[in-house]
Amino acid sequence: MRIAGLRCMAELRTLLGVPLVTLALLFAAPAMAGNETYAGIAAASADGRYAAVFYLSEGRVDAPAALLRSDRNMEHSYEEPALATAACGDFNTFLEYSRWTWDKRVPELSALKVFSDRFDDKSDGKRARIAWDPDTVMARLEILESERWWPVRALPGEVANVTGTIELSDRYLIRVRRDADIHHWDELYSIVRADVPAVGARWLRGRGEALTATGALRELREKGARPFTKRPRGARDAQAWDYRRAKALDPVIVKWESAGSFGPFTPQDLLDLVWLYAARAKPGDKLRALRVFLRLKGRDPQSAQALLAVLGNDPDTSEMMPILEQGRDPLKNVEHLFWPARTVDELRPLSDDDLSWLHRGFWAMGGFRFADPKFNEYFSCFDWYQPVSEKTWKKLMADSFFQKNPNKAVLVERFWKTLDAVVELEKERGLSSPEL
């Protein structure tokens, strides 16, 4: 049951004369499938340890507000014990924080700082913002100091947005909203001003934690212990095995990607991170490995080449070698053009090579196969690449209409408009279409 506490329901039952079971059903509404829920923070202590939390379901108050320790998971804070509770409105009215009626006055309440808006104070981008690494897809919280944006927190997990900023003499109090499908909740970060520029210390600390965790996994690998036991053959058993391995590897990968929010990966870092990507083998992991490797290659080609030699001699990372040895990520410059439909004028700034790769990209999104194995290897890095079966592909290649104009195949119907623009621009430049 999702509510700030059974004691609150008992008090309401006494006041209203309503059976406890009835109230339980009344306030359990967010647990029902399809209800949009929000656990929001209206005020917080300067040190970020305590927060005044309200609960909405479908935009209406659905439980008493609560004073909670903010180190709890706000997504599930209905179930957390409260230091105090407050009436903050009813199903039709949501009261301003100053009008909340607390059941008792505890010392922590007097220290709370109130956010200027319960939902979004429009401070995003002024002193605090969310940035993200397009290669590892890791979000981070940044603060503006001395005309520079400093990364202060890695934010793995669900999509995050800054919705509140309170500037104090010695620190920032930042409220961040998380969104996961129809469930939303706030998180709180108290950042000491003096610590904002200490990016190097955060980088070293993050790398140290990741190295320690990876070392423990490598020891398990040497012993052949879980999660490195042999993958079973049965489909159901194999699926369970994949799940258990990912559960063991995910937190360590997150440690590395979080450390990468504060500084560049060293060759030794990438040796461990690529090994973890190869072990997890989730869709998209090859692409992440390629992109972090290309960063090192652009910064230090000699170290990148030496790293390739080490990875190539490790049977655990051999499957990564074809894509890493290609050493290119041509869709990175054009994948933002897949949606929405584009015109010739929008595509004209592209180089000839980018235009050809955009063309291939649309075909790949339609499930096309390619005669050149390096193209299939590259597109297999993307979790959206679902090639048609070999049998279906042979039939398509034998079809005269498909051979004449694959750009009008039903498989790529979603992209016909942009493909028309691509073909028009290729003709304008005297280019041939890519080969299948």
Image (cartoon, helix red, strand yellow):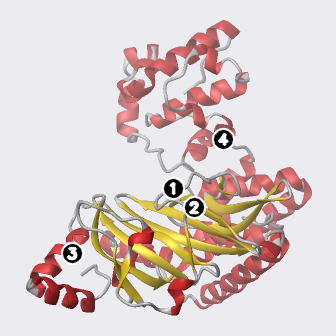
Disc 2 designates what residue? 164
Q: Which of marks 2 and 4 is nearer the N terminus?
A: 2
Q: Which of marks 2 and 4 is in front?
A: 2
Picture layout, residue 42 above or below residue 375: below
Q: Nearer the viewer, mark 3 or mark 4?
A: 3
The residues bearing labels 2 and 4 have C-alpha atoms spaced at a distance of: 33 Å
Residue 376: image location, x then y, percent: 56, 42
| Residue under pointer 3 | 28
Q: Are marks 1 and 2 in contact (CB under 8 Å)?
A: yes
Q: Which of marks 1 and 3 is nearer the N terminus?
A: 3
Q: Are marks 1 and 4 in contact (CB under 8 Å)?
A: no
Label 3 and label 4: CA atoms lie apart by 46 Å
**Residue that carries the numbered disc 1 in the rendered image:** 120
Could you give the CA–CA distance between mark 3 and mark 2, rounded to whole angstroms? Answer: 28 Å
Position above or below: 314 against 160: below
Q: Nearer the viewer, residue 4 or 333?
A: 4
SS state under label 3: loop
Quadrant for the C terminus, please: top right
Mark in the foreground, 3 or 2: 2
Name which quarter of the figure residue 351 lies in.
top right
Which amino acid type is marked by label 1? Asp
Label 4 is placed on what type of residue?
Answer: Lys
Q: How far apart are marks 1 and 2 (CA)?
A: 6 Å
Q: In this view, does 26 lie to the left or right of 133?
A: left
* Residue to which mark 4 is pinned: 332
Classed neighbour count for the residue bearing mark 4: other residues with Cα under 10 Å, few (<14), some (14–19), many (≥20): some
The residue located at (39%, 39%) in the rendering is 388
